[in-house]
Amino acid sequence: ASTGTAVGNSGTIIRRGALITWDANITVFDNCSGTGTLTFGLAPSATDGLDATLGEAERPPVPPAGVFDARFILPVTPPVPSFKDYRRDTVTAAVWRMTFQPGSCGYPITFTWNPSSFPANATITLRDEITGTIVNVNMKTQSSYTLTNSGIASLRIVYTRGFSSSVLVNQGWNMISVPLQAQDMRKTVLFPSATSPAYGYNNGYFIADTLFVGKAYWLKFNSVATITIVGAPISPPTIAVRTGWNMIGPLDFNARVGGITSTPPGIIQTPFYGYNNGYNVADTLKVGKGYWVKVSQNGTLHLSTTLAKSGEATPPSFDNWLKVEIEDNTGAKMFLYLAKSDEMKSSYELPPVAPAGVFDVRFSSNTNVEELGQGRHELQLSSAMYPVQLRAVNLNGWVLNIRDGVSGSLLNERLDEGKPVKILQNLGRLVLYESNAQREIPTSFDLSQNFPNPFNPTTVIKFALPHNMTVKLTVYNLLGEKVTELVNNSYEAGYHQVEFNGEEYASGMYLYKMEAGEFVRVKKMIILK
């Protein structure tokens, strides 16, 4: 019989004459009228087995299918079922295993609880036993969960004592950091859904099995996810750095770049670069993200939670510079800039090229900014998924041409303001030519041979106009039958290109015909599947 309830001096709750540090009820409902309430928590005298003084008692075997049942399975050998399960309150982590079966109405099964029953300095999640990702519910921010997957007949309640912080990851490659000192810092424990090793950096990439707070790592994921890290904050909020490039993370709070200082003073040489489908200059280091920074000597970075003061350095603005946008077929995008010498205030050196598989574009000078007026700029592409699209803005009278880095015979295109140029094949190295001449106008009509040829399924057809003209471009088969009309529009004088997709057409030879006023030209092309 119960002896009543009272609160002791230590804040623990006294029930049945025993001390309970904390406990909570989880109520289970099936789709009919089946219901049951299970109790779990921590107590100073608890063991993994049956604790009669805490109300734990062995239950009979599970009833036949079609009869509702819910129970905890105590972690002893052989396993023991009970409606209550307490663990010793000295543990920093615990797992309660709950099994259930619905009545005759079957699934869904609903679980409810009171989040205010849980201690403040702990993380408590409801998870499936298969991967821990099919069901992954933060029980402190939700009060119920409905399970519709009839293949799941058991769940785990996972308790971890300490503070928690969320790490947001994107699909694909991420630069991430661990904001808290967890009990187990292995990559496989912290980020079990990652599909790549964790790559750290120390004058070169290495595979890290154990991760460290304050450091950052490259990791790849198949989908967007929010990952909860439980552990202790690092104090004081400092990060050790070594001469050269460092991958760092901002601990458990967002840190303003303008408030970061160093010991020795003045060792920070570059902006802080984050990554989101390409490098970007950060004004705030965000929890769980990773950043590059270069320093002139070994030292320490000091992070501040205060807002930036007036007069503090802000990330450079490239908004008005000549910009070339490079985007690959996955949507990953990076930007390169050309600026006048009096506008360039630093070296604009980029961090090291990321591990294989991470899209990267930079000038061969290892920067994302070069001086306008040099005439020639070499571009290096890494891990791009083709086709790749280039687009230039803010030309302001400058003329840009993009060519392949070998002979210019594979690619030779003009980058007009805002108009995309598509590169269909992997060239790896490109050369950007710039001049301040007036926009070049062809002196005669021309229809170029399509490229590539043969092709499957797309090719590009280029033509030149010495003056404004209506152009009709038509594709025929060898019988002279019209297959499709690619364009029939007015164009300004200049160089133009049209893409033809032959995916729905059979292999073989075709003709394409250009008509522009009195100019008529026909060329052959081959679809080869």
Image (tube, rainbow, N blue to C red):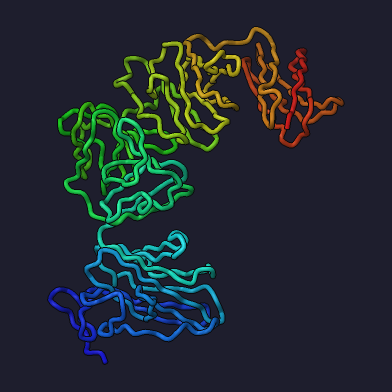
Residue, far bottom = 1
Q: Residue 162's image quarter?
A: bottom left
Residue 309 appears in view: no
Q: Residue 454's image quarter?
A: top right
Residue located at (54% from left, 18% from top) = 404
Residue, far left = 9
Left or right, residue 311 beside residue 476: left
Instruction: Decide which of 481, 213 is in the foreground and name it.
Output: 213
Q: Residue 514's image quarter?
A: top right
Residue 109 appears in view: yes
Image: 131 above or below 111: above
Q: In which quarter of the image is the C terminus?
A: top right
Instruction: Decide which of 166, 521 is in the foreground and name it.
Output: 166
x, y percent for residue 502 = 72, 32
Instruction: Decide which of 499, 311 is in the foreground and name it.
Output: 499
Residue located at (19% from left, 36% from top) = 300
Residue, far front = 77
Q: So how many labels did they put on this image?
A: 0
x, y percent for residue 449 = 70, 17
Residue located at (12% from left, 76% from top) = 9
Image: 61 above or below 501: below
x, y percent for residue 446 = 69, 13
Residue, far right = 479
Q: Quadrant of the N terminus?
A: bottom left
Image: 121 above or below 396: below
Residue located at (35% from left, 55% from top) = 228
x, y percent for residue 108 = 52, 73
